[in-house]
Image (cartoon, rainbow, N blue to C red):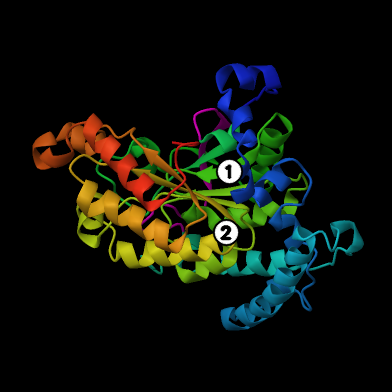
Amino acid sequence: MFLEKLEPYEIFTLRPDAFWIWNNEEVKERLSWYYQVMTNNKPAKFIIAKYIESPINPYEIEDQRELWKIHDSLEKEFSKIYKEIRNDQLKLEELNKPKYSFLDVKIALARSHLKKCRLCEWKCGVNRLSGRPGICMMDKDCIVHSYFHHMGEEAPLVPSGTIFYGGCNFRCVYCQNYDISQLYARQGEKVDPRKLAIIQETLRKTGARNINHVGGEPTPHIPFIVESFKYLNTNVPQLWNSNMYLSLEAMKIIKDLIDIWLPDFKYGNNQCAWRYSKARNYWEIITRNIKIAYRNGDMIIRHLVLPNHIECCTRKVLEWIAKNTPKALVNIMDQYRPEHLVAKHPEKFPEIARRPYRHEILEAYRIADELGILYKPIS
């Protein structure tokens, strides 16, 4: 896919708020790390990870437990260096690039999950290297359906260098991307890590503010995404746009590499999550992972307002955000529409077989205002 460079006047014409948003000092402060990487004043975290030396070649270690020991030791060094760079106490140029790095250790760990996959909380244990797909419908191949400059994301992210991956570990009955997430998940382009790095470089050099890993769901593609960073030498913020149903192991692998998180916080309880997305233990897993992400990067949380779900979902989600991630920006989304199975079988899901009413959206805003959540600049 050939991408023409986006000129500033084109962005301003299409999304003037993408420029004005940075006049909002509170937004700029909450997204301070992302802003500095976006403007090339700081190196992306994946680049810093390349400068943390591994004492041994991690690709020769087959014991995953031994790899985790090395990983956890190097993580302490990474955190120290990252903080020094963030606080202007150290510049990347002062460091030497080692033969094997913290990033290599993460690559080795991510690859090992293809043999017995535990990247998401289904932990299906499938040997994807054999060609057998997991619950996510992905096997040994990285599947990319499209990549382009996305002009419809939140203002601080536009233009976003969006990569749409195939497959998903959810089965959302109203999914707007159901073609690539469920129906035709494996019918995209097979892309290896080197090609994935070229895609990211192309997106950045033609005007993208970030690389937006989305889908479908990016989680099944973690081994390929992490390895692509080895070949990516262009500074660009990495954005994780996800349902956040990752395992703890997967979170440990990516949390030191992601500059800004875009979690999709859907439901306020496990019952709604199971009915509409077939996700078990949703609340416990998603809140755990969002807390981890919040401690390891900037964050914009998305919440899609579902009809008839203000009290059971929207209120609960917003109350949790206000208490646990108070500095996160929140996009309260009114874009829900009946899609996929809800559109096909509205009699099975009558409670969500319509667009949200205006009074439901206004009630969501009122709750957010009452809780002191910053949502207006990006919703």
Q: Residues within 10 Å of mark 2 (few under 14, many from 20)?
A: many
Percent coordinates x, y for residue 330 in the rendering: 45, 46
Q: Establish if 11 lies above or below 197.
A: above
For the residues marked 2 and 1, what is the alpha-carbon distance in whole angstroms? 32 Å
Q: Name the quadrant of the C terminus.
A: top left
Percent coordinates x, y for residue 251 in the rendering: 52, 65
Do callouts 2 and 1 mark residues in contact (Cβ within 8 Å)? Answer: no
Where disc 2 sits, the SS reads helix
> What number is the disc on residue 166?
none
Percent coordinates x, y for residue 221 in the rendering: 52, 53
Q: Residues within 10 Å of mark 1 (few under 14, many from 20)?
A: many
Percent coordinates x, y for residue 25 in the rendering: 63, 42
Q: Which residue is mark 2?
A: 223
Residue 119 appears in the rendering: no
Residue at left 26%, top 40%? 363
The quarter of the picture where residue 88 lies is bottom right
Is residue 142 part of the magenta span, yes or no?
yes
Relative to 218, 105 lies left or right: right
Q: Which residue is mark 1?
A: 27
**Residue extent of the magenta highlight:** 131-153
Residue at left 21%, top 31%? 357
Residue at left 51%, top 70%? 249
Give the prevailing secondary structure in the magenta stretch: loop
Looking at the picture, which amino acid does disc 2 mark?
Pro
